[in-house]
Amino acid sequence: MTTAVIPPGGKGAEARTEGTDWLSAIPFLLFHLVPLLAFVTGMSLKSLVLAAVLYVTRMFFVTAGYHRYFAHKTYSMNRVAQCLMAIGGITAAQKGPLWWAAHHRAHHRYADTDRDPHSPRGGFWWSHVGWILSREWKGTDTSLITDLTRYPELRVVDRLQWLGPWALGVLCYVIDGWTGVVVGLAWSTVALWHATFSVNSLAHLIGRRRYATPDDSRNSWLIALATLGEGWHNNHHHYPMAARQGFRWWELDISFYVLKLLQGLGITRGLKKVPAKARVSRLIGSAASAASAAKAKAVEAAEVAKATAAGAAVKAKDTAAAAAEAATAHCRVTPATGS
């Protein structure tokens, strides 16, 4: 396995001296022309359904597998399920699980600094796709993923990551011929690439910030919709250990819902939650004001309840005292009777 230690000087525009890895860049760029062959092959309902299915399933393998499992370990699986998740991930043509996890961990460690592999501060193109095509980040810093490299099956899957897209291409051809390859595979792959790449680029540029994280991460419902929940990026950078990235009930997080279903089936387990304290820490702007107001309201309600309880206790004490006094007076005025 190739090892590439995080460059000490960062990857700012002035520090990118290694250039583009054209051996990888040329096929990647040319593949963007393949969807245009649909004018030759035509489309079919079968190929369109195939494209939709491949987009959603491979997005899940990337978001729930590569990201929330391999990069962050937000839940647990047995080794068989872990290996299947890795195999599913390589069909997305976004390199292997070890490469992906190592670079993402580096991103969180150095988010939006000169040592971040893909910060938009180095330019939109760089954060979106340029860094992937760069020689600078071609290798894998295995020191960041020692918990993963101890599994030989993951090392094999990572090394043979190129097999995933090719095997999927053959399957698409069997299902619907060249139309299946062009529409089913190529369309969904290009869409999948740029949807996931947008989390690195657009999710640090557009959207709202709920938490005062030291980076530029933002929440975007549009990106969340396209990526099965990855668009709640500011939430994620605030508390990356959680399996759920949509912290509010209305923040759609389809990957999490599927993980919950798989947990019910016994495939995944131990989905890590967002602690109540983390939900209200580092809030900014109106969110902080709303949280403060809610807290003040809760304190006020507690004080009212306490005062009410104290008043009731005093009243009960007075009532008891009055009853005791009346009983004593009654005993004094009632003559004793004897036999």
Image: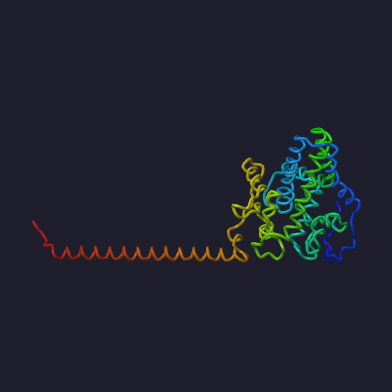
- Does residue 241 appear to the left or right of 42 in the view shown? left
**Which residue is found at the position 55% from the left and 66% from the top?**
292
In this rendering, position of residue 197 left or right of residue 30: left
Across and down, in percent, residue 200 comes to: 76, 57
Q: Can you name the residue that lies furthest to the right here?
A: 23
Q: Which residue is pictured at 82% across the width and 65% down the height?
A: 10
Towards the viewer: 275 or 22: 22
Residue 329, position in %: x, y?
18, 65
Q: Quadrant of residue 213?
A: bottom right
Q: Is residue 224 left or right of residue 20?
A: left
Q: How is the image coloured?
A: rainbow
Q: Assign the C terminus to one quadrant of the image.
A: bottom left
Residue 103, image x and y in percent? Answer: 79, 56
Residue occupying the far front of the picture: 39
For the question of whether residue 207 can be seen, the reply is: yes
Q: Is residue 153 visible?
A: no
* Residue 321 location, quadrant: bottom left
Seen from the viewer's position, the closer of residues 284 and 7 is 284
